[in-house]
Image: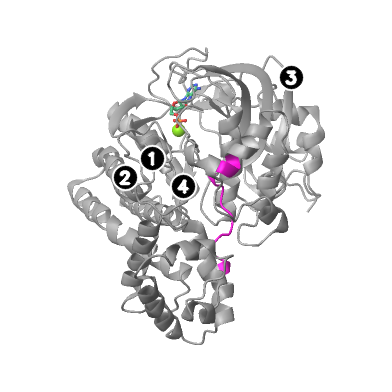
Amino acid sequence: MRRRGLSGLLPCWALLSAASACLPSAPGPGHCASAGGWGPGSCRGPPLSSGSRPAALPVDPVQENYVRQVRDCIFSVAYPTPFKSRVLLVAISKVVLEEILDLDVSVTETDDFLQLVSGGKVGFGFVPLAHRYGGHQFGSWAGQLGDGRAHMIGVYTNRYGERWELQLKGSGKTPYSRDGDGRAVLRSSVREFLCSEAMHYLGIPTSRAASLVVSDDDVWRDQFYNGNVKKERGAVVLRVAKSWFRIGSLEILAHSGELDLQRSLLDFIIQEHFPSISMNDSNRYLDFFSRVVSETANLIALWMSVGFAHGVCNTDNFSLLSITIDYGPFGFMESYDPDFVPNTSDDERRYKIGNQANVGLFNLDKLLQALKPLLDSRQKQLAFQIVEGYSSHYYLRFTELFKAKLGFLGEGEDDHYLIAFLLRLMEDTKADFTMTFRQLSEITQDQLKELHIPKEYWALQDLAKHKFFSDWVTMYLLRLRRNKGDSDSRRRKRMTSINPRYVLRNWMAESAIRKAEMNDFSGVHLLQQVLQHPFQRQSVAEKAGYALHPPTWAKDLKVSCSS
Ligand code: AMP
Ligand code: MG
């Protein structure tokens, strides 16, 4: 497989021509790849013709870039605003560029690349778009939101036939910017860049990040909403996902009574992303809903399995493909605490980690409300049953994941109890969530049996302070003995391959950001490298203290919605 430079790739990104006023539809890979492979000139066909052409989705006929209420369309044409000052490419994800975008990493050395990923240059025959969506924010309907600082700059079908949407975040104002400046600052961009990639390597469905650039343009932010406005620098992440459609993408159409358009959007999403659902099936919206319900339950169970709190679980931040999107004030829980809230702006603690599953249900209920006008009465009834099944789906998946985290094979009648018991011990002792599971994966059964916890297993030492620790250990060892065909080394191997040693703790991101703000990006690069292999012990990571007790200065760290 010959990888291409930017000039070879770009003509193959089938993007909307403004004149055609319909949704971008990427040609299949066969369409772009000539027999001789990829290269300039190999994509000659009409960019919008494709075998499975989705229903046309309209684009806002108004093309001026000013803030407004938009109707009867899914996208508005919006061009990125170039930075005024110099821009610097801070980081790239080689894997995303090579494996998703079929690019040779050498393109990142070109000025064309820098211009493209910073929003400095458009052209290439493509019309960038901002998506119109709404959403429930912190429980209330917020009306029109939309891509207020994001631009879709391409849709690319790669050599595996996967369709990826490329989006710049922080690239300037759009019709959906409301009071915002259309920008993103360096600290939040570093967090999104690092965390989306880290989540992927943890095995959690997520958008990906291809590049991060920083400018010298001033962006003013009141980070903690306390009147302390500070000058920061504008940055842009090029992020990619198979789709950026959210629950809010459908909600806005239902709220404004644009039902034909809602049908078109749903059909497009089903056709592109749910190939097992037949377009001729009159129950296809129900099937779609059922998938979103089960996959959302799955996603939140996965978040819980690594102690991830998204921070802003509004319906506009919940993907219809059930991937993690829109990284803001997220956090990985350190001491186990179901009340952990990463976002200091979340006064009601609505999005605390222990409430994520409930909030998922709230969001799915909002999706159901949006779909209702498109369902007949029998389908509505079935949809209610589907949503009622969410809790058991979530609970099943959560249990499966936590059983695996504890190394259990097969079924044990006390498995639920053992999981709940352990979580209770962790809560009481404030044991570190990530390292408790990791150290249980590393310690031998013999060491556990003797209740001899070596010093390196600091999280287990914390846990062992609990008066019921030995009771739990006794039950746990008995249960492990019931694993059929297992050995202790097999168990440890299995558990260390799913219980990460490194997650993006707030203090780790913060250290990298503090350096980055002084133009030293070594911390970003180090974390990027380490978090690609979260399950492997790495000497650089050990040296940096990434598997140790968080430093005391990290206790007061806060993140907010300001980004
Ligand atoms: P978020 O909290 O990042 O998910 O954003 C919620 C909504 O606010 C979305 O419609 C964003 O596009 C918009 N938004 C957030 N920050 C800005 C900004 N600096 N400028 C314009 N729109 C923004
Ligand atoms: Mg958002």
Q: Which mark is residue 271?
A: 4
- Which of marks 1 and 3 precedes in the sequence? 3
Residue 335 sits above or below residue 251 on the image: below
Q: In the displayed structure, does residue 187 sit left or right of residue 434?
A: right
Q: Amino acid at mark 3?
A: Arg
Q: In the displayed structure, does residue 128 sit left or right of residue 66?
A: right
| Secondary element type, mark 1 | loop
Q: Is residue 173 visible?
A: no
Per the model, the C-alpha gap separating discs 1 and 4 is: 26 Å
Front-lying residue, 253 or 323: 323
Front-lying residue, 557 or 235: 557
Q: Nearer the viewer, mark 3 or mark 4?
A: 3
Q: Nearer the viewer, mark 4 or mark 2?
A: 2
- Which of marks 2 and 3 precedes in the sequence? 3
Question: Is residue 301 one of those drawn in magenta?
Answer: no
Which residue was labeled with disc 2?
Answer: 359
Which residue was labeled with disc 1?
Answer: 313
